[in-house]
Image (cartoon, helix red, strand yellow):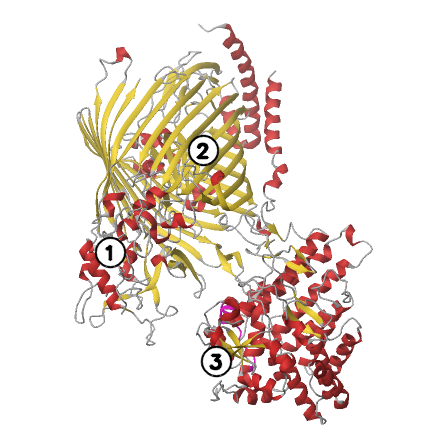
């Protein structure tokens, strides 16, 4: 009898303690309501959503309008306009490490890098039957690599040496990497992406995705920026060999808001009217008559740019790029530094739509690559071969052929042609830098305000690259600063 | 005579015990060869053979006592009584049996040739024999080697209690009980020995053995006793579940064996605001406004025609509020079990109109012996409460109703001609509109309970298994009237409904071994515990109400939103503890706990928390025999580690990086859903916060127990402090944040003294008094000196952005106020001058803000008195704090003189013209000189001394009432917060707009003030 009781008791004890090993699930919990890196990235659908998220980084301020501020207002194409001290500092070369744009562009571009890294970190381990017999998985990785390369190209050209982060599981406090090494990573990403990306096709339901043409074109730009014109030429030729691409017959069509993802477009940021996809950039640029806003708008084309159009009688591209606001269609406010009408406004995006514009941003288009090829040919001692390419661009906008013949004159002609063709599209600052630091400094230091008074920028070599944001240096002690800041 | 059934049972149990005895002997031989050899040697000497002795041990009411230790004096063998109080052992005729039982006087009875030796034990009045609940067991107070404070219901039953805070307040040294807000039903804060973590100041609560997050589930009138485990040596057994801040063990009332009893307690009272502040009248207000506008070079606005009233809005907002409560408890028990049924009711109006707290509670406790080896029990406590709040500083911009009662100009009418609550000309609502147009009500269900089974096993082992449950569920409803005020009209009314459920279930299994042999006493316990918590939250809101008659969301027509969220977490623990004493003189306790949890990083899930303590009862030494006046003297030393879980308000899944699914992109013509990286960023290496604490103490009892003195010194350091740190953008997120352990310590060091004495002890008049004093020094050290973590955001002036008042920073205590140092008003300009600390010629945020004092007191004290004269009793509880500051953020609104606000009377001394020497700066609309920035201008001394509670009672002599069944009757009148001496200029120095925050302390910003309370009541025992 007593045996029965004691053994029963022991059984209970045993049962009580036996509950424990089964309880490991007590401390191994996965989030229920939050999406995390562990419950996501399981399926092909997750991979697509993650990649879409990486593309979503193209909706951040850098790609909405900062690239234009940095490319055109920092250069001689635009005045900062508006009323934002941070933008004035970019225009006037008085940047410091506390500047808000310096911080947000760094943060935004690295957020883009991280979202591309998330795809590259996690998708390789996914296996899904929907990928059987096709190359979609490789395409996804290639698209992410293209995006990462794009962000790094913008980082390295803006800040010089930057931390090279190619996985989200690495050092949280990385130091800066030499720009040359960052360029190597960009080239490797693009070359490796190039073979997996789809070629562009007119019937592509996925227009907006990075294509082989996108990667080829970006590679051409990356090599050109390093002065590697031989390689640049190779990738320009690859773009031009693709019969899919051609110049639109009518230049103005590119910027009328009705011609998206044309045969001229190599990489274009997609906007629409759906929530979360709209473009607030145009509202920041367009005048009262088109928006009803009474406040001062940004990135106003300079007198110098207007003169460049006018001296060339380039009415097609001037009309497509600039809107002249007269007293009759404003509320009376004249954005600085202009003091009297007519005031030129940036006009390559024509629908403000109350900060919800559906206008796309074309980051790279064929005219850019044609002129880049001309530049590469000229730089590699083939000015004669470059001239027809310049004329191809000029013919479309009903301008006569260039008269340049010598290598120096052809270089100047290409630079000017690029300025007019690509005005306000964010390319000018890098074009100037390719023409040389001294050239850039002399051009910028001779700029005048609308009344003709010198602006006396006092640009020096150090100011050709931006400072590393102080707030990031505060968070990462391993981040060094550029000289002069 | 016994009936047949128990006899059969007894036969069975004898057989069992016989077996057990044999097994015990072999265990002894096995475990401790030496003592048993000695025993064998003794029994081998030529003496008469021992005979079997049996008997029953009873208490004063002849109820059987189980678990009484029965030993042979000078021998090594012993046993304990079963549930019927019976024992059986072998002893020689010449032997003397020693009966000892916790809480009772030890009794010695010679065997004298009898075969049946019964004993009746008397309860001991000595405090040292009290049984103290220490977590997974009990211990005699005399044996305790760590810092444990006990509070018995006798200390509090003198008056009704509305909150558990009143049971704890002032009763234990080193324990600060704090009421951040006077709102009915508001949370209270308990700080044991300072604040051991920036992530939380509150201790953990263990209610009848169930680990709970707070005490909301119990009616405080059901509390029987409280043990506060203050040091790591005591709290270490609770490991990581937050025990770094100490553990509060609450035991609820239970029935008594062999006695049925009915207790009824009913009371009613009134509450009043302790003081009103002087505000400007209409003429003074208009003059102020003139100054503000002319000094800002602005045109004076045209005030509405109907601004002709003369309201002191405090009179409109505050009223004398009634509170009524009643409790009944029914209890009883047989020799085999006890039961108790309790009911409670409370209806407390707040001193601000419409605010109210109602609580209906029921609790049930039962313990039953099923047979000799099995007993079961359960405790269930449920209450439902209704809380109606007004928007105060903790829940509204501009400080809500409380501040609006000060800042709304006297000339504003309550309602305008259209019957709409009038707003000030800058659009801010008047407080009456705030009260009646917004309805905030919460219905809460709280359930706490356990079911446990205890099994007696061979070898003096006892197995206990307990399932505990804690459920907190609420339904919150907010409604803004669509017709009665400008904002409500503009959005056509608004409603929100939130329901939340937090379910926590625990499973405990413990095995206890209790043995004494000779001079050695050992209690050992090993156990496991699992805690699982599930959290559910659903929230919905909407606008567009066509009618004010239906305040629920079915009547909303626009802006409808829905939200739902769930989380869960768990802790899995193993623990063990040994209490050992030798000759009652040398005491030792050692414990170890291992906790694993889902709330720390997956790479560091387990934490190990050892604790040791020792005690020496010096008074038991022979050399102390001649020191007659010392009754008892014990010195104690202990060290241990405790842990804190990472804060749950950031994430309970710290290992995982969050993703955000709201990131679309367009491909072709389709909008595709995308997923992007979000906050927080996962940290799989996140560790527990670990507290290490050294405690040195003594307890001395002198003058035959009339005076006791306890003192403790402690030094506790919490390391691996957890902060939400912003990572560089390269880590993958803009301002990405991650929970990290930073180097450095949160150190609390101090000492505490408790002195209790029976000052006067005569036949008719008695006075006992206790003085509790404690000093605490808190510092954050070892953090990177560049790191500043900001807390205590105040959205003052309606600026729309938080201005931070408090910081956590290296070298400063928690609750540190951080801002500019105000140097007084410049007589030339009327602007407040601020110190240029780095002498660079400008006063800027980066270089000229500094430490301005802390909201955390450095000493706390209480003075508890109990007088009895014949049938009268008087209890007085004084308490106070010192060394702390208050940031009076309300004064930014009431003395800022930069908006359309009315102001308090201080501004009558404002600077008006060059040469004026005053401490109140210039009145200037929109404050371009930032005279009202966060600075020492608004820092005030937070020290206070107050009469917290006074109760006068009268016991009716019940001798003549017993025949009608009344055994006790007592009338009382109580006053609370009768007076407060303080230098603080706001409503009340016990305040914190940030509630129970451990990093932002002592901030007053439109916080609901405390009240003065007068109560009358009656206790009836049937």
Magenta span = A464-474
A466 in magenta: yes
Residue on which the image places disc 1? B903
Q: Distance between the residues labelled 2 and 1?
A: 42 Å
Residue on which the image places disc 3? A341
Q: In which quarter of the image is the C terminus of chain B?
A: top left
| In-image side of B550 versus B751 (left or right) | right
Label 3–label 2 contact, CB within 8 A:
no
Instruction: Give the image location of residue B719, x and y in percent.
Output: 47, 54
B675, above or below B5, in the image: below
Do the residues indicated by labels 3 and 1 lie within the same chain of the protein? no
B364, above or below B803, in the image: above
A470, above or below B477, in the image: below
| In-image side of B275 versus B608 (left or right) | left
Report helix, strand or loop for mark 3: loop
Tell which subunit mark 1 falls on.
Answer: B
B800, above or below B191, in the image: below
């Amino acid at each position: 009898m007593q045996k029965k009781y004691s053994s029963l008791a022991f059984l209970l004890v045993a049962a009580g303690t036996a509950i424990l090993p089964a309880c490991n699930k007590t401390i191994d919990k996965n989030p229920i309501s939050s999406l995390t890196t562990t419950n996501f990235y399981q399926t092909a659908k997750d991979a697509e959503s993650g990649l879409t998220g990486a593309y979503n980084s193209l909706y951040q301020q850098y790609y909405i309008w900062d690239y234009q501020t940095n490319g055109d207002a920092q250069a001689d194409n635009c005045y900062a306009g508006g009323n934002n001290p941070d933008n004035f500092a970019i225009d006037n070369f008085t940047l410091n490490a506390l500047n808000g744009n310096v911080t947000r562009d760094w943060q935004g571009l690295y957020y883009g890098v991280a979202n591309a890294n998330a795809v590259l970190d996690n998708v390789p381990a996914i296996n899904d039957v929907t990928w059987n017999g096709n190359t979609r998985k490789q395409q996804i990785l290639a698209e992410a690599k293209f995006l990462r390369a794009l962000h790094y190209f913008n980082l390295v050209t803006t800040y010089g040496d930057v931390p090279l982060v190619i996985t989200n599981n690495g050092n949280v406090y990385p130091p800066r990497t030499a720009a040359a090494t960052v360029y190597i990573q960009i080239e490797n990403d693009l070359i490796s992406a190039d073979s997996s990306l789809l070629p562009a096709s007119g019937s592509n339901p996925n227009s907006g995705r990075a294509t082989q043409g996108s990667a080829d074109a970006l590679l051409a730009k990356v090599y050109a920026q390093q002065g590697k014109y031989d390689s640049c030429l190779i990738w320009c030729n690859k773009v031009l060999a693709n019969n899919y691409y051609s110049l639109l017959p009518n230049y103005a069509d590119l910027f009328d808001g009705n011609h998206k993802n044309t045969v001229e477009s190599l990489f274009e940021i997609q906007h629409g009217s759906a929530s979360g996809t709209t473009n607030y950039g145009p509202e920041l640029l367009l005048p009262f008559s088109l928006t009803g806003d009474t406040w001062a708008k940004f990135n106003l084309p300079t007198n110098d740019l207007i003169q460049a159009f006018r001296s060339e009688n380039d009415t097609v591209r001037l009309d497509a790029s600039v809107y002249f606001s007269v007293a009759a269609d404003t509320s009376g406010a004249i954005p600085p530094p202009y003091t009297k009408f007519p005031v030129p406004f940036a006009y390559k995006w024509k629908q403000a739509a109350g900060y919800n514009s559906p206008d796309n941003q074309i980051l790279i288009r064929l005219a850019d690559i044609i002129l880049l090829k001309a530049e590469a040919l000229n730089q590699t001692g083939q000015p004669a071969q470059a001239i027809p390419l310049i004329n191809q661009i000029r013919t479309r906008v009903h301008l006569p052929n260039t008269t340049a013949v010598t290598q120096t004159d052809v270089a100047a002609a290409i630079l000017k042609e690029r300025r007019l063709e690509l005005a306000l599209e964010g390319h000018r600052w890098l074009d100037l830098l390719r023409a040389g630091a001294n050239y850039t400094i002399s051009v910028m230091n001779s700029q005048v305000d609308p009344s003709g008074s010198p602006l006396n920028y006092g640009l020096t070599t150090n100011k050709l690259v931006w400072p590393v944001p102080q707030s990031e240096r505060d968070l990462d002690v391993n981040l060094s600063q550029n000289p002069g800041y | 005579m016994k009936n047949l059934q128990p006899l059969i049972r007894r036969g069975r149990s004898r057989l069992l015990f016989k077996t057990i005895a044999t097994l015990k002997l072999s265990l002894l031989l096995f475990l401790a060869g030496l003592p048993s050899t000695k025993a064998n040697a003794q029994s081998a000497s030529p003496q008469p053979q021992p005979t079997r002795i049996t008997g029953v041990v009873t208490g004063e009411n002849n109820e059987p006592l189980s678990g009484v230790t029965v030993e042979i004096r000078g021998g090594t063998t012993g046993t304990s009584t079963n549930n019927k109080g019976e024992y059986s052992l072998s002893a020689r005729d010449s032997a003397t049996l020693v009966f000892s039982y916790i809480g009772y006087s030890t009794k010695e009875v010679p065997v004298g040739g009898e075969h049946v030796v019964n004993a009746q034990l008397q309860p001991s009045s000595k405090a040292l024999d009290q049984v103290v609940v220490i977590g997974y067991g009990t211990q005699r107070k005399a044996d305790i080697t760590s810092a444990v404070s006990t509070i018995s219901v006798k200390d509090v039953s003198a008056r009704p209690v509305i909150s558990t805070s009143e049971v704890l307040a002032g009763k234990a040294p080193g324990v600060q009980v704090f009421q951040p807000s006077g709102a009915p039903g508001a949370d209270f804060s308990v700080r044991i020995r300072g604040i051991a973590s920036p992530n939380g100041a509150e201790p953990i609560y263990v209610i009848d053995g169930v680990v709970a997050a707070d005490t909301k589930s119990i009616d405080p009138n059901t509390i029987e006793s409280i043990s506060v485990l203050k040091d790591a040596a005591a709290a270490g057994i609770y490991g990581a579940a937050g025990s770094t801040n100490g553990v509060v063990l609450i035991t609820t009332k239970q029935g008594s064996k062999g006695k049925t009893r009915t207790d009824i307690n009913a009371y009613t009272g009134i509450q009043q605001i302790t003081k009103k502040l002087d505000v400007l009248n209409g003429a003074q207000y208009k003059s102020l406004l003139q100054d503000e506008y002319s000094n800002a070079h602005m045109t004076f606005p045209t005030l509405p025609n109907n601004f002709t009233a003369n309201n002191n809005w405090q009179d409109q907002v505050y009223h004398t509020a009634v509170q009524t409560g009643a409790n009944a408890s029914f209890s009883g028990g047989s020799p085999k079990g006890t039961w108790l049924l309790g009911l409670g009711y409370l209806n407390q109006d707040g001193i601000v109109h419409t605010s109210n707290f109602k609580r209906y509670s029921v609790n049930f406790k039962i313990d039953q012996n099923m047979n000799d080896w099995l007993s079961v029990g359960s405790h269930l406590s449920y209450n439902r409460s209704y809380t109606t709040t007004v928007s105060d500083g903790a829940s509204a911009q501009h400080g809500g109703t409380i501040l609006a009662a000060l800042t709304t100009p006297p000339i504003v009418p309550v309602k305008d001609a259209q019957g709409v609550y009038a707003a000030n000309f800058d659009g801010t609502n008047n407080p009456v509109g705030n009260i009646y147009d917004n309805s905030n009500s919460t219905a809460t269900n709280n359930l706490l309970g356990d079911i446990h089974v205890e099994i007696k096993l061979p070898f003096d082992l006892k197995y206990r298994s307990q399932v505990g449950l804690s459920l907190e569920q609420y339904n919150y409803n907010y409604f803004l009237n669509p017709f009665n005020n400008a904002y409500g009209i503009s959005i056509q009314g608004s409603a929100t409904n939130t329901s939340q459920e937090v379910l926590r279930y625990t499973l405990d299994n413990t095995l206890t071994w209790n043995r004494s042999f000779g001079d050695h006493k050992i209690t050992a316990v090993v156990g496991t515990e699992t805690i699982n918590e599930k959290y559910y939250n659903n929230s919905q809101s909407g606008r567009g109400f066509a009618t004010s008659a239906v305040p629920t969301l079915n009547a909303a027509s626009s802006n409808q939103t829905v939200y739902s969220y769930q989380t869960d977490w768990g802790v899995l623990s193993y623990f063990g503890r040994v209490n050992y004493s030798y000759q009652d003189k040398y005491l030792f306790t050692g414990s170890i706990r291992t906790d694993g949890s889902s709330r720390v990083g997956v790479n560091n899930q387990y934490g190990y928390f050892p604790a040791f303590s020792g005690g020496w009862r010096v008074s038991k030494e022979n050399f102390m025999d001649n020191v007659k006046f010392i009754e008892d003297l014990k010195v104690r030393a202990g060290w241990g580690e405790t842990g804190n879980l990472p804060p749950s308000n950031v994430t309970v899944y710290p290992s995982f990086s969050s993703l955000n699914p709201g990131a679309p992109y367009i491909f072709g013509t389709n909008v595709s859903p995308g997923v992007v990286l979000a906050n927080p960023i996962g940290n799989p290496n996140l560790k527990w916060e670990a507290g290490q604490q050294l405690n040195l103490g003594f307890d001395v009892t002198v003058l035959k127990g009339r005076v006791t003195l306890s003192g403790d010194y402690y030094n506790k350091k919490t390391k691996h402090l957890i902060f939400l740190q912003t990572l560089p953008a390269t880590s993958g997120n803009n301002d990405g944040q991650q929970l990290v352990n930073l180097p450095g310590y949160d150190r609390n060091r101090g000492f505490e003294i408790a002195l209790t004495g029976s000052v006067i002890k005569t036949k008719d008049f008695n006075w006992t008094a206790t003085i509790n004093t404690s000093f605490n020094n808190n510092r954050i050290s070892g953090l990177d000196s560049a790191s500043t973590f900001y807390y205590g955001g105040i959205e003052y002036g309606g600026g729309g952005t938080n201005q931070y008042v408090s910081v956590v920073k290296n070298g400063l205590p928690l609750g540190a106020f951080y801002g500019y140092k105000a140097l007084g008003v410049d007589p030339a300009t009327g602007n407040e001058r601020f110190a240029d600390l780095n002498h660079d010629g400008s006063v800027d945020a980066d270089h000229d803000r500094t430490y301005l004092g802390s909201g955390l007191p450095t000493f706390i004290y209480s003075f508890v008195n109990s007088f009895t004269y014949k049938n009268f009793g008087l209890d007085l509880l004084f308490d106070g704090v010192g060394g702390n500051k208050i940031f009076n953020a309300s004064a930014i609104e009431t003395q800022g003189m930069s908006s359309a606000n009315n102001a308090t009377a201080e501004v009558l001394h404002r600077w008006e013209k060059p040469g004026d020497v005053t401490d109140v700066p210039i009145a200037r609309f929109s404050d371009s000189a930032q005279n009202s920035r966060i600075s020492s201008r608004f820092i005030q001394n937070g020290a206070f001394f107050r009469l917290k509670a006074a109760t006068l009672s009268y016991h009716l002599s019940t001798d003549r009432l017993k025949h009608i069944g009344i055994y006790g009757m007592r009338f009382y009148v109580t006053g609370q917060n009768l007076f407060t001496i303080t230098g603080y200029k706001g409503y009340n120095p016990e305040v914190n707009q940030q509630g129970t925050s451990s990093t932002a302390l002592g901030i007053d910003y439109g916080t609901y003030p405390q009240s003065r309370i007068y109560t009358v009541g009656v206790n009836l025992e049937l």
